[in-house]
Amino acid sequence: MTYGSSLRLWNLENVEKSKAPLLFQDNYSIIQEAIQIYNEALKLLYKTGIIPVCVYGGESFNNQIADLREGCDILIGTPGRLIDIMNRGIISLCIFDI
């Protein structure tokens, strides 16, 4: 798993650096692992106001983008879907302190 610091990413009009982490998986069965990490994040972040979002292939791209646009403090995802989202200009890693 790779960790880097990010920002409150998904207010796309006001992109600023912050301390929220970007998490992504890079090994076998990455989708199941990303979902497991997301489910654990939901439990740990319950009633904190911190919003995790999980993005991965095989599920509706539009629904995942809608989740991002509603707000995201922690982004959990698979490399392929993250690259797809970056290539579409929805997110950019140039705003991360890694």
Image (tube, rainbow, N blue to C red):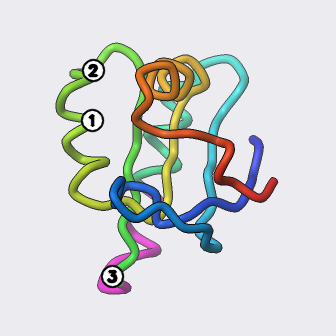
The Cα–Cα distance between marks 2 and 1, rounded to whole angstroms, is 8 Å
Residue 83 tag number: none
The Cα–Cα distance between marks 1 and 3, rounded to whole angstroms, is 19 Å
Camera-nearest residue between 59 and 66: 66
Element type where label 1 sits in the image: helix
Q: Position of residue 79 (x, y in %)?
A: 61, 24
Q: Position of residue 7 (x, y in %)?
A: 55, 64
Magenta-drawn segment: 40-48
Q: Residue at x 49, y 50 (%)?
A: 75
> Tag count in the figure?
3
Location of mark 3 (residue): 49
Residue 64 tag number: 1
Marks 1/3 in contact by CB < 8 Å: the verdict is no
Q: Position of residue 15 (x, y in %)?
A: 48, 61
Q: Residue at x 40, y 53 (%)?
A: 39
Local packing at callout 3 (Cα closer than 10 Å; few below 14, some 14-19, many 20+) is few
Element type where label 2 sits in the image: loop
